Amino acid sequence: MTDFLTAINSFVWGTPTLLLIFFTGVILTLRTNFFQIRFFGAAFKSFFKTSQTKNGKKLTPFQSASTALSATMGTGNIVGVAGAVALGGPGAVFWMWVSAAFCMIIKFAEIALAVRYRDTNPDSSYSGGVMYYIKNALPKFFSPLSYVFCACGVAAAFGVGNMTQINTMSASVSAFAKTLFDLSPQGDTRIKLFVGIISAVCCALVLKNDGSIGRFCEKLFPIMTILYIGMTLGAIVSNCNKIPTALSQIFIGAFNPKGITGGVIGSAFIGVRFGISRGVFSNEAGLGTAPTVYACSDGDEVGLGLMGVMEVFIDTVVVCTLTALTLLCAGNITYGVDTASTLTLNALTNVYGKNVIFVFCPVVCFFAFSSVIGWGLYGTKFISFLFGNRAKTIFLILFIAAMLPAAVFRADAVWLIAEIFNGLMAIPNITALLFLTNEIADITHTYKRKLQGK
């Protein structure tokens, strides 16, 4: 069964899906005259512009961005990048950058449409996302796609957004405890179960409403980002003499991986595939998750869309690049061999010594738990669209309960199924984006004319 699911997962996240997302990014870039590049400065200002809201049930734009980034910046930014570099060569980083450039406009388009076609609830809060612009902007015969999207999103929330992250947290805390104590198998299980219980309690306290989620992520996101950027920057600076070599490996390896990996990775296509897939999986552009939280914000479609541009930049260009440079400057990579988070930890240990785990472990936990919170919000929105607001409570109970077994057991089949559904979310979303290309172009052109005073 696991082999069968792995084959399906490889197909769902394979070349056709990645090319479809990449192709959509190219089309939107051309139709909007490279909007994400020309207005990147505006995106930067928009991201750091704070705003207040009079209704505590609505999110501020910064809270929306923090929640979206908290969901996307999971352990994949540490583990996934390590795997991309080890299996695709340093050149994968170059293609990760290329994919980010086109993912920026996809994320902008998703958010702008989600805000334009969101619904206003009786309590003046908002509900929006991919399912709403499929329902409200496309012809009625497309409406089943909105339910397909939400059903896939609920399944992905349990696996990709919950169980995978909790298991990574418990494994990280267990590894940390083993450096301090001589743990028996029973003691190891107790520690992991304790992590699951604490995570469940904290999740129950945070996932009360949109406002509490936004306030939590608004505070957690800067802390975990600064800690991780500080660790990786320190490792890179301490090996600054290797930076020119690392950068040359990235650019040369993008087109001639044999020259960098010694022939272990001989096909440039492998680097392209791993780079693009890492970029898409990291920032989730095309999957349609982030628009769900941005649509809850008290902001305008262009302003929030520009924040989405910056979100992709921070997640993929900044955080993922720092991970890659840390590995290339301070680590020892065996190309062509699958890796885990230990590759990044080993690189940091080479610089800071074994005590770095005292910082690395909390950072991993922050990254993982932030993803759980973000996906918890997504899941409540998806389930409410399918079955109404009353289903939200049932979802949260099951979502929180799933953390206990996830902390102790590794259920590969469950996570593979969740990853498959996560990838399938792209099909309804990309379909809608392609049909609404003219409207997306009109949004950007109207914004440019407004700035020009015409």
Image: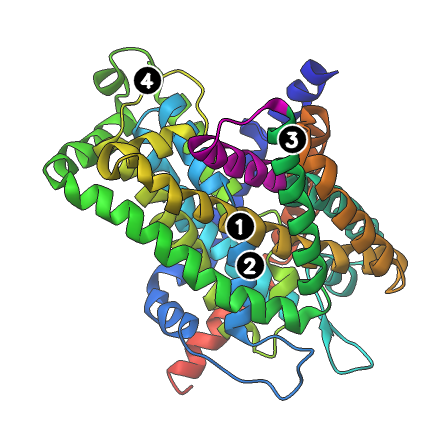
Find numbered disc 2 in the image and state the secondary structure of the residue it sits on: helix
Q: What residue type is labelled 2?
A: Ala
Quarter of the image where one finds residue 139: bottom right
Q: Which residue corresponds to mark 1?
A: 72
The kind of secondary structure the magenta stretch mainly shows is helix
Q: Where is residue 155 in the image (x, y as percent from the top left)?
A: 75, 42
Tell me how far mark 4 sits from mark 2, CA to CA.
33 Å
Please state the extent of the stretch shown in magenta in the rendering: 164-185
How many neighbours does mark 4 have within 10 angstroms: few (below 14), some (14-19), or many (20 or more)? some
Residue sitting at x 25%, y 48%: 233
Mark 1 and mark 2: Cα distance apart in space:
6 Å
Give, as a three-letter code, the residue at label 4: Thr
**Which residue has dot 4 on it?**
334
Amino acid type of the residue that numbered disc 3 sits on in the rendered structure: Thr
Residue linked to disc 3: 189
Between the C-alphas of marks 3 and 2, the distance is 32 Å
Q: Between disc 4 and disc 3, whose residue precedes?
A: 3
Q: Which mark is residue 50?
A: none
Marks 1 and 3 in Cβ contact (< 8 Å): no
Please name whichever residue, 175 or 145, is drawn nearer the observer in this view of the structure.
175
Residue annotated with mark 2? 68
Q: Quadrant of residue 390?
A: bottom right
- Name the foreground residue: 60 vs 340: 340
